[in-house]
Amino acid sequence: MARTGAAADRVAAEVSDRLERLATAAAENILGSLYAPQVATPTRAQSLAYWRPYFFLPDGSVNQPGRDRVVSLVGGAEYAEIARGLAREMRDEAAATERVLRLARGPVPPVAPRQEA
């Protein structure tokens, strides 16, 4: 009878241990989902606005220490992707500025054809 009691005690201890681990895992998952920081994916414009000061100083000149920092943070491939995105954004901004300036100057008068003497 003693053997049966020892086996039952061992099974009871294993079941108890298993239940404790399951309860702990469930609690961690529930608490993790309740209190975990909410992650939002930034828009392309927000992402580029974040990285722009790393690439350029306020006067528009190159921020080489910032660029070096980006390479060390994200690696070469991601750096190149960010740089391409910033270049596209800057081209778009320049084109939009040119359109606004053209509109501000008004319509261009037609050029009269040259007359030969």
Image (cartoon, rainbow, N blue to C red):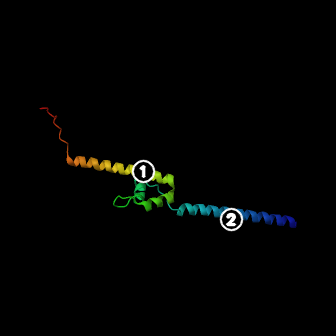
Residue 27 position by quadrant: bottom right
Name the residue type under label 1: Gly
Taking the spot 75% from the left edge, 63% from the top edge, the residue there is 14
Residue lying farthest to the right in this orientation: 1
Residue lying farthest to the top in this orientation: 116
The quarter in which the C terminus is drawn is top left
User: In the image, residue 96 lies at what x, y percent?
Assistant: 30, 48
User: In the image, residue 53 lies at what x, y percent?
Assistant: 40, 60
Q: How crowded is mark 1: few (under 14 residues within 10 Å), some or many (20 or more)?
A: some
From the viewer's perspective, tell me whether residue 86 is left or right of residue 99. Answer: right
Q: Earlier in the sequence, mark 1 or mark 2?
A: 2
User: In the image, residue 108 lies at what x, y percent?
Assistant: 20, 42
Q: Which residue is denoted by mark 1 in the rendering?
A: 85
User: In the image, residue 2 lies at what x, y percent?
Assistant: 87, 67
Name the residue type under label 2: Glu
The quarter in which the N terminus is drawn is bottom right
Q: Which numbered dot is residue 41? A: none
Q: Which residue is denoted by mark 2 in the rendering?
A: 20
